[in-house]
Amino acid sequence: MGQSMIDLPSRLLLNLEPWRNAAHWRIAFSGGLDSTVLLHLLAHLAKTEPLPPLSAVHIHHGLQAVADAWPQHCQSVCDGLGVPLLIERVAVRPGASLERAARDARYAVFSSLTQANDVLLTGQHRDDQAETLLFRLLRGAGARGLSGMPAQRPVGQGALIRPMLDASRAELEAYAQAHQLRWIEDPSNQDRQFSRNYLRHQVVPVLTERWPQAQVSLARSAAHLREAQGLLDELAQIDLAQASTSHDFQWLGLPSLELAPLTELSAARQRNAISHWLEPFTRLPDTDHWSGWTDLRAASQDASPIWRLADGELHRSAGRVWWLSGRWLRTPVIGCEWQTPSSALRLADNGRVMLSGQTPVGPLQIRYRQGGEVMHLADRGHRDLKRLLNERAVPGFVRGRLPLLFRGEELLAVANLAGLDGPEHGAWKLHWQPTDEDQGLS
């Protein structure tokens, strides 16, 4: 017996089986057909099945006057079913895509509400999945985009689940009519200006007239592509493991990869590995902007190429690529007096420095490299700082922010670099913590 032959309530229960032990099931309730059916199904199942506590949340965007009546409608539906309802009002920043801005505002609320072991349930169905696939296909999406909406993904500290992706809109309508449910028809769903509505009203009906199984087939393709994307993710992990080598600058606390193992891969495998690695840090570039990676990789040995992305920069230095963002991209303020060297000194946009051992005498100052600095080494006489940094292969982007300890015009120490971080016999040492512990990788 095929999955579609099982009645809607049983199928829903089957899809939600893995989350039966969650702390809380919260339904994203717009008041439209899909979420009304989902809410009704769950409220009725809860009478006979041991389910987690149920509640609903309605997000009021206030984008159209007619929407002002919706919270009241949602409240009366929830009261009738005995399900607690939370109404959250959000302000949508008008911009290029109103649909997207409204979605971002919704998901910000969903994230903040979803605690550990909570489940947020949304009502998307198979027709939505087919529209998503067509919409993304027309925008030139890759395998990840064409794998459609996942049945589950993380949200906040819990999970977002779409338990009705295997049901059609027609099935939901039949259920709603059989149970005499009332739901809101959002007038913006008829607005053909919106690409999705154009697909829904103009394109999909023509397709299904010729290919009645079109939506089932599109959903099947999305599932195949999701599996393909899973394999690409596994391949990326294998390739990244080769490039995630240890190095002398772990203390920087920065994400980095060794370049050599990556350059041995085909161009497509490089892009796959790098985009997998970058995904937690930044919005990824579209296909046309991957030339930045090619330039970074191909630049001459003595160059320090940079690839600028939406939320930070990729630098190549000392045989590695490094991800820099936030304070790493701000130039630290030049120099400051160190009044009490016995305690740590906070540096603007550059973590903090501290001394261990006997504090050196003097009026002490922390400065940054300007060029032309010379340091006296017991065994080697006077040496150019530039040369000393070259010998230790210090990454280019670190050189301008390495704290230097001066007494008057005498350069006493360079933080964290063995042999340069204090006197030869170790009476004291200069330590630099580039990012505050509580800051993590941000």
Image (tube, rainbow, N blue to C red):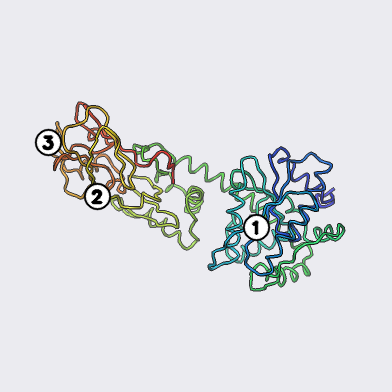
Q: Is residue 227 left or right of residue 416?
A: right
Circles 2 and 1, Cβ within 8 Å, touching? The answer is no
Percent of width and height locating residue 358? 22, 27
In the picture of the structure, the residue carrying the numbered disc 2 is: 334
Q: Nearer the viewer, residue 284 or 175?
A: 175
Question: Which residue type does callout 1 highlight?
Answer: Ile
Residue visible at 75% across and 46% down in the picture: 15
Rendered location of residue 10, percent (x, y): 82, 46
**Rendered view: 429 above or below 215:** above
Kind of residue at disc 3: Gly
| Most foreground residue, 71 or 139 | 71
Q: Is residue 167 left or right of residue 434?
A: right
Q: CA distance from mark 2 to mark 3?
A: 27 Å
- What secondary structure is found at the residue carrying circle 2? loop
**Dot in front, 3 or 1:** 1
| Picture quadrant of residue 411 | top left
How far from the left and from the top, in percent, is residue 161? 68, 48
Q: Is residue 169 visible?
A: yes
